[in-house]
Image (cartoon, rainbow, N blue to C red):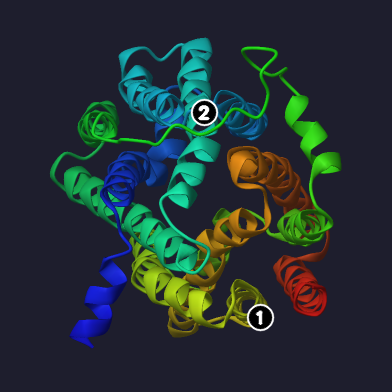
Amino acid sequence: MLRNQQQALKYLTRNIWILSLVSLFTDMASEMLYPIMPVYLKSIGFSVVLIGVLEGLAETTAGLSKGYFGNWSDHTGRRTPFVRVGYALSAVSKPMMAVLTWPLWIFLARTIDRLGKGVRTGARDALLSDETTGTTKGRVFGFHRAMDTLGAVLGPVAALVFLQLYPGEYRTLFLLAFVPGLLAIAATLLIRERRQPRTEQVRSRPGLLDFFRYWKQSTPAYRRLVGGLLVFTLFNSSDLFLLLKAKESGLDDTAVIGVYIFYNLVFSAAAFPLGALADRIGMRWVFVAGLLVFALVYAGMAFATVPAAVYGLFFLYGIYAAATEGIAKAWISNICEKERTATAIGTFTAFQSVCAFAASSLAGLIWYGFGAAATFLLTAGVAVVVAGYLGWRR
């Protein structure tokens, strides 16, 4: 056991450790605010409609910018400038939301946060890919996701403790969230990269929507994989719907936050082992198995009526996330050209963001018109179909 762990750890280079710690600190800062964001926005005068517009604009910004900046990273052959700027923007946005409460200022702060995610995502994932080989990417991306998700555990716990001691001090919490953000910024300065070859030599930067061209330029294997992933994403709504169903099943507000933390703990613990398994038996089979677990969770949530069932399903949901989130990017990086890795992942995550926004809107409409069970059963059915497609197509 010890020998296997030592062999696994040798694949984790200095840059992988640093990037993973950066993600941990950043996710800790973000997740400190996630549970209280709607409450805070309402307390400063935001209506539910305005909150929806805010989140829609923020996610659209993140989606489009992921493709653009991923393409730009490949175009210049650089990774670290995009990683550093991206994490810095997200860190700075946290205290901005506490300084002023004007609606336009809040819109600006939230957009800067999501823009930061867009700037860094493609370049960061390409840098992770550059640090490994095709036989160890599952481990590397799994480890990164494990550390990132550990931040999603520590953040809400810190927020719960703080609000127990200082109820209603939301603005102070936004300022405190800047501390792990600063640690993330400092850690990015320690990253060292090997300069990648430029993909083009004519212009200094690509056009805003040039990444769309990559879809036509990419390999058939890339289009088949990403096409299947996007169909799944189009029906995979926000986790807020799962939390809402948990609430309806009898969990109080504290327990809902608790089950969300529990899910992230399972996700964090399982991500690295499942990444290692993917390296051994293939990305395809671990990912397909993850989709089938997802289908089981959503089918179960359609009928869950007691808290114990909800906790069991959220345990499985953590397994699903560990088997798919990091592995999807590792799989993509294995089938694209090395010099176009940031563009390939950036293009996928850009389309994914748009589909995710549409998915939540669709889920809300189905829930409103036909009830929660219909929403979850439809999503489960689509997951089974996509699992069959990805398992069958080579």
Q: Along the polypeptide, which appears first: circle 2 or circle 1?
A: 2
Residue at figure coordinates x 53%, y 72% from the top left: 323
From this viewpoint, is residue 377 visible?
Answer: yes
Callout 1: helix, strand or loop?
helix
Viewer-nearest residue: 136 or 314? 136
Identify the residue position indicated by label 1 in the image.
292
Residue 368, given in percent of the width and then of the height, sits at 77, 56
Callout 2: helix, strand or loop?
helix
Q: Label 1 sits on what residue type? A: Leu
Q: CA distance from mark 2 to mark 1?
A: 32 Å
Seen in the image, is 339 located left or right of residue 371? left
The quadrant of the image that shows the C terminus is bottom right
* Total numbered labels placed on residues in the image: 2
Nearest to viewer (mark 2 / mark 1): 2
Residue 352, given in percent of the width and then of the height, sits at 69, 47
Viewer-nearest residue: 28 or 17? 17
- Residue extending furthest toward the left: 165
Q: Label 2 sits on what residue type? A: Val
Seen in the image, is 222 located left or right of residue 166? right
- Above or below 160: residue 205: above
- Above or below 238: residue 114: above
Mark identifier at residue 54? none
Viewer-nearest residue: 218 or 246? 218
- Residue extending furthest toward the bottom: 1
From this viewpoint, is residue 243 visible?
Answer: no
Seen in the image, is 393 located left or right of residue 67? right
Residue 331, given in percent of the width and then of the height, sits at 61, 62
Identify the residue position indicated by label 2 in the image.
119
Residue 119, given in percent of the width and then of the height, sits at 52, 28
